[in-house]
Image (spheres, rainbow, N blue to C red):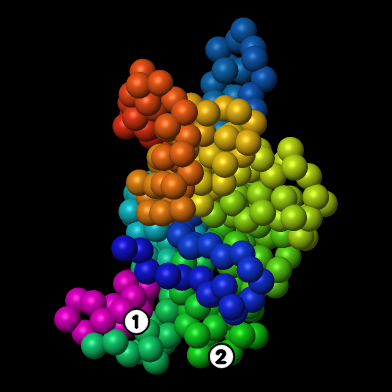
Amino acid sequence: MKQRTWPTRSDACRFKSLPLPNIKSLAFHSTTIPSNSRSARSSSSSDFRDFSTLPFDILTKIAASFTLPNLQAASLVCRSWRDALRPLREAMMFLRWGKRFKHGRGGVRPNLEKALDSFLKGVARGSTLAMVDAGLVFWEMGRKDKAISLYLKAAELGDPAGQCNLGILTCKAKWYLQAAAGGYVRAMYNVALCYSVGEGLPQNRRQARKWMKRAADRGHSKAQFEHGLGLFSEGEMVKAVVYLELATRSGETAAAHVKNVILQQLSAASRDRVMLLADNWRALPSSH
């Protein structure tokens, strides 16, 4: 079971999410002018950017939310990147020790103070993942200003976990939207709720349904349940049962009752088709 890294429902507004690190990709583009001469082609080939010339501060901001495997891969690009990313690789070590101290793993006893100290060492090295975990510890200790400050820092660096948690703590839907646009599933669900009830965003049923389906198609169990109910209300029985079955398999017990009621109205062939669709279902990719 994944450990909780978000405030509880009673801590702030009524939406919540489980933040996980986002994996960003690097893309560099260069432009060359076509030419028929060999000398022009040779000259244009030198116009491609040299990765090693990327300023360290820009590189570390891009990689701030990278996990260890992605940092290790990026460090192989060139010696310059390896040197620039050393602090973030070190941050992963402190992050790992922080989780051990917080949850009592790896042969160590739970110690929240030591966990926070380790997370803050990761924060000092620029890791947004450490910012998210340190923010939760501060929140649990009642130091809410510190928590919000760290989540804001992570959010501004593009970390979807920080964005979504900041939305939870401040009840500002703009942070949900940013995280959802980056493929963060639980932010998609929160955006759907905001549009549905008109909280933080203008009430818009069409947008609510769109984001609920996106979350459901990426494996969010509550979104699967609610999207299934929506399909049922529109008479889409087979599709509704598929989503309700998926929600049931993910532990949404309330979905099972509705699913069984609908199944009684379907033919044996339709019931078999529903189970086959559910068995073959695969979640769409996401940053979650």
Q: Is residue 125 visible?
A: no
Residue 16 at x, y percent in the picture: 56, 65
Task: Count residues near mark 1 (Cα–Cα under 10 Å), then give few for <14, some for 14-19, many for 20+.
Answer: many
Q: Is residue 145 above or below residue 276?
A: below
Residue 83 at x, y percent in the picture: 41, 62
Q: Is residue 264 above or below residue 50?
A: above
On the image, which quarter does residue 39 sit in?
Answer: top right
Disc 2, SS:
loop
Image quarter where the N terminus lies is bottom left
Segment colored magenta: 93-108
Q: According to the image, label 2 marks what residue?
A: 142
Counting labels gives 2
210 or 264, nearer to the observer: 264
Task: Count residues near mark 2 (Cα–Cα under 10 Å), then give few for <14, some for 14-19, many for 20+.
Answer: few
Q: Which mark is residue 102?
A: 1
Residue placed farthest to the left in the image?
107
Q: Is residue 200 a member of the stretch shown in magenta?
A: no
76 or 258, nearer to the observer: 258
Q: Which mark is residue 180?
A: none
